[in-house]
Image: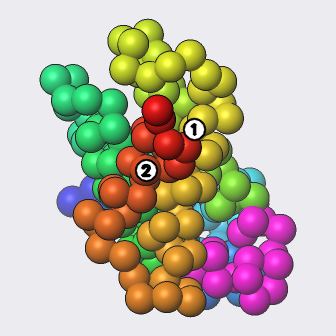
Amino acid sequence: MIIDRRKQVVEAAAKSFALFGYKATTMDQIAKIANVGKGTIYTFFANKEELFDEILQQVMLEMKRIADGAIQEDKPFFDNLYRVLDGVLDYRSQHELVIQLSHEVRDFGTQMAKEGLNKIESMLLNYIEQQVQIGIERQELKRCDPQVTAFIMLKLYVALTADWRKLNEPLDKEAIKQNFRLYLIEGLAFHK
């Protein structure tokens, strides 16, 4: 049986970052979890930052796979958007690494953890921006700035799903969709 040492190191590092965060994870710890010598890690990765980035790339690829799987070409833009955001944010809220990074940023302000979360958010914003552009081209959305629109959509969805429940009873998925529809599709102004 051939052992894939690189994979073993990456899995051990992912486990360590998820359990202890970026700041508290050491190469010695990763080596111990992977059951390899520290030198083996340096065969594949120059430093902890490079290893961390490898793991972030895997998380982002998985999020993109989830988002791509949520898109149904025959469905309207907003139906697809709800499915993409539900799937990706569910994954993000259950993935131990992302949870640990969020805690680390909140509690310690660790720069690498903050940068990691920013990379994930940027990937998600780029994905939504591309979908907005497609919605405009298909004339499902008015002409708008796709980058600004993606930002507003993501921030509104996060506000309704995560931020709201910090002070209030959580909204169910239908209430979230209704509010999303009200603020982004219909608007608040009366139409005479």
What amino acid type should be assigned to the residue bearing mark 2? Leu
Q: Residue at x 57, y 38 (%)?
A: 150
User: Is residue 53 or residue 28 the one in the foreground?
Assistant: 53
User: Which of pointers 1 and 2 indicates the residue nearer the eye?
Assistant: 2
Q: Which residues, given as a range, are shown in magenta?
A: 99-114
The disc, 1 or 2, on the residue closer to the chain's N-terminal end is 1
Q: Which residue lies furthest to the left in this view?
A: 74
Q: Residue under label 2, please give it.
A: 182
> Which secondary structure class fits the magenta region best?
helix
Q: In which quarter of the image is residue 159?
A: bottom right
Residue 1 image point, x, y percent: 21, 60
Q: Residue under label 1, please give it.
A: 150
Q: Can residue 2 be seen in this view?
A: yes
What amino acid type should be assigned to the residue bearing mark 1? Ala
Residue 97 image point, x, y percent: 52, 73
Q: Which color mode does the image show?
A: rainbow
From this view, report whether residue 78 is shown above or below residue 111: above
Q: Residue at x 37, y 63 (%)?
A: 176
Residue 81 image point, x, y percent: 36, 41
Instruction: Specify whether 129 is left or right of 118.
Output: left
Residue 192 image point, x, y percent: 46, 32
From this view, report whether residue 176 is shown above or below residue 62: below
User: Is residue 11 or residue 98 the one in the foreground?
Assistant: 98
Q: Quadrant of residue 13?
A: bottom right
Q: Residue at x 33, y 31 (%)?
A: 77
Instruction: Specify whether 165 is left or right of 4.
Output: right
| Disc 2 crowd, CA 10 A, few/some/many (<14, 14-19, 20+) | few
Q: In which quarter of the image is residue 148?
A: top right
Q: Do the residues labelled 1 and 2 touch (CB within 8 Å)?
A: no
